[in-house]
């Protein structure tokens, strides 16, 4: 949560820098410039119509454009094996309360750290909002049986391999 708040604050400060440039270009009166700069610095830009219009214009709000990915923190998933030498399974939280979604992996090494789960585009028969998450009895897929049996691909949030970041030697 702290990271998200810091990202929002950094984004707002970047917008303030752009607004300062616009204020400097548009106003020629030094007293008016000083008043606007002080209002920006003290976060009083919401009361000034000119500054609030400029901040709305230059402060880009975040929009998520990834519909097939989910990031799971290290403390939110559980990696386990069904047999001693078998492949690893992940249990991640689903959409229903206290229900885990179990995902088979095609490796015997358990992933560590923050994971980015990427859904494959092989099956589009589920509704987009519930595509594989939190569904107890999902509908049967009408595609080939091979597309149903493929395990999910996991990657670290940093974009590295499923086994963690590469060590540089």
Image (cartoon, helix red, strand yellow):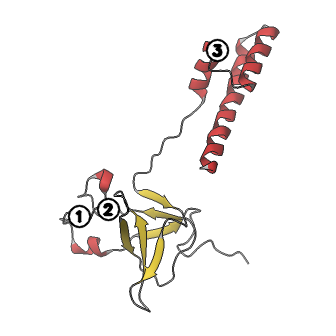
Q: How crowded is mark 3: few (under 14 residues within 10 Å), some or many (20 or more)?
A: few
Q: Residues within 10 Å of mark 1 (few under 14, many from 20)?
A: few
Asked whether disc 2 touches disc 1, contact meaning CB atoms under 8 Å apart, the reply is yes
Instruction: Classify 93 as above or below 33.
Output: below
Q: Gap between marks 3 and 2, in whole Å? A: 47 Å
Going by the image, does 125 lie left or right of 64? left
Pick whichever of labels 3 and 2 is earlier in the sequence.
3
Q: Is mark 3 on a helix, strand or loop?
A: loop
Q: How crowded is mark 2: few (under 14 residues within 10 Å), some or many (20 or more)?
A: some
Rendering quarter of residue 7: top right
Instruction: Classify 33 as above or below 61.
Output: above
Going by the image, does 15 lie left or right of 76? right
Q: Residue at the location (28% across, 71% down)?
A: 147
Asked whether disc 3 touches disc 2, contact meaning CB atoms under 8 Å apart, the reply is no
Q: What element carries label 1?
A: loop
Q: What element carries label 2?
A: loop
Q: Gap between marks 1 and 3, in whole Å? A: 53 Å
Asked whether disc 1 touches disc 3, contact meaning CB atoms under 8 Å apart, the reply is no
Q: Gap between marks 2 and 1, in whole Å? A: 7 Å
Q: How many marks are shown on the rendered structure?
A: 3
Q: Residue furthest front?
A: 98
Q: Which residue lies furthest to the right in this view?
A: 30
Percent x, y for residue 121? 33, 61
Residue nearest the viewer, comparing 39 with 164: 39
Q: Residue at the location (57% across, 25% down)?
A: 56
Q: Mark 1 points at which residue?
A: 138
Percent x, y for residue 43? 69, 25
Percent x, y for residue 13? 69, 34
Pick whichever of labels 2 and 1 is earlier in the sequence.
2
Q: Mark 3 points at which residue?
A: 48
**Label placed on residue 132:** 2
């Amino acid at each position: 949560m702290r990271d998200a708040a810091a990202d929002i604050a950094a984004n707002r400060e970047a917008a303030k820098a752009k607004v300062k440039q616009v204020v400097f270009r548009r106003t020629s009166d030094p007293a008016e410039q000083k008043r606007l700069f002080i209002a920006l610095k003290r976060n009083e830009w919401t009361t000034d119509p000119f500054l609030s219009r400029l901040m709305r214009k230059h402060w880009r709000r975040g929009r998520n454009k990834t519909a097939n990915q989910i990031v799971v923190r290290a403390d939110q998933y559980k990696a386990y094996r069904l047999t001693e030498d078998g492949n690893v399974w992940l249990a991640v939280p689903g959409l229903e309360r206290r229900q885990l979604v179990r995902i088979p992996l095609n490796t015997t090494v358990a992933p560590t750290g923050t994971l980015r789960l990427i859904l494959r585009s092989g099956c589009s028969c589920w509704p987009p909002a519930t595509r594989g998450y939190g569904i107890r009895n999902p509908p049967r897929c009408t595609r080939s049986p091979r597309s149903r049996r493929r395990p999910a691909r996991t990657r670290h949030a940093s974009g590295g391999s499923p086994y963690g970041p590469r060590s540089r030697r």
